Image (spheres, rainbow, N blue to C red):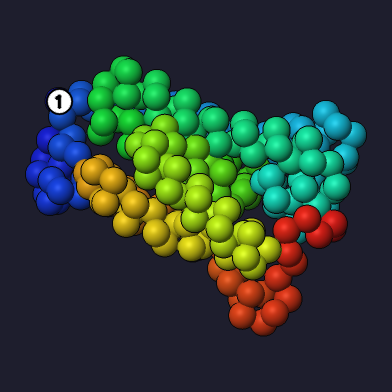
Amino acid sequence: MALGWLGNAFSPTIMPPFESATSLLLLSAALGYILGSIPFGIVFARAFGLGDLRKIGSGNIGATNVLRTGNRLAAALTLIFDAGKAGFAVLIARMLAGEDAAQIAGLAACFGHCFPGWLGFKGGKGVATFIGLMLALHWPAGLATCATWLAVAAIFRYSSLSALVAALLAPVWLAITGYAAAVALGLALTLLIFARHSENTRRLLGGTEPKIGKKG
């Protein structure tokens, strides 16, 4: 049985038709979630003797908080692996089934990073995972998303603000680079990133948000 009815319920211009077998879509979701929930920030923080990342800086398990320890290599590895786990999930699901499965796997990877079961569903903000998903799903939109993040970070030096702007523009980049069938996914990711950055948004508005590279 396939989930074709789901794709038909929405405009085909903003999401792909769900034509793959339900079993493959569920497998893709499970694969994405499991890969996404691997806490590479904690892994590399311990490997480099930096301590429990959840007790450092903001307590977040992502690359930005690893950078606050002052160890740039550990932060870079966290960024690469957090992005790579979503990218790998997308590519494997695409190979096994198709674009519908790839999008489900990518979204599940982001949820896995943000809400990992073995960490009490208290995970990261999902930015690196989101960018890795975008690059693997449609590299032109992924590169535009990376460029957006880098430009905002270079100007304002706030990782959270960079993430919010990049997430806000992700559906736009998907549409104008020729992959409008992922716009619905882009909108879902925008909502997820904004929800995970609610505290950062309040600090940005209050002028208390720490800038990139500030040690915890």
Q: Seen in the image, is 190 located left or right of residue 36?
A: left
Across and down, in percent, residue 41 comes to 71, 39
Please state which of residues 67 and 60 is positioned toward the viewer in this rendering: 67
Residue 171's place in the image compared with 81, above or below, is: below
Q: Seen in the image, is 155 located left or right of residue 175?
A: right
Across and down, in percent, residue 94 comes to 32, 24
Q: Seen in the image, is 12 located left or right of residue 38?
A: left
Q: Is residue 29 at least partly visible in the picture?
A: no
Q: Seen in the image, is 28 located left or right of residue 161?
A: left
The residue that mark 1 highlights is: 1
Point 32% across, 18% down: residue: 95
- Considering the image in quadrants, where does the C terminus appear? bottom right
Residue lying at the far bottom in this picture: please name it.
Answer: 206
Q: Which quarter of the figure has residue 116?
A: top right
Q: Which quarter of the figure has residue 149?
A: bottom right
Residue 108's place in the image compared with 195, above or below, is: above
Across and down, in percent, residue 213 comes to 78, 55
Please state which of residues 158 and 128 is positioned toward the viewer in this rendering: 158
- Considering the image in quadrants, where does the N terminus appear? top left
Across and down, in percent, residue 10 comes to 14, 51
- Give the structural element (helix, strand or loop) at label 1: loop
Point 15% across, 37% down: residue: 17
Q: Residues within 10 Å of mark 1 (few under 14, many from 20)?
A: few
Point 35% across, 37% down: residue: 138
Please state which of residues 154 and 215 is positioned toward the viewer in this rendering: 154
Question: What count of labels does the image hold?
Answer: 1
Q: Is residue 93 at least partly visible in the picture?
A: yes
Point 77% across, 36% down: residue: 74
Tell me the kind of residue under disc 1.
Met
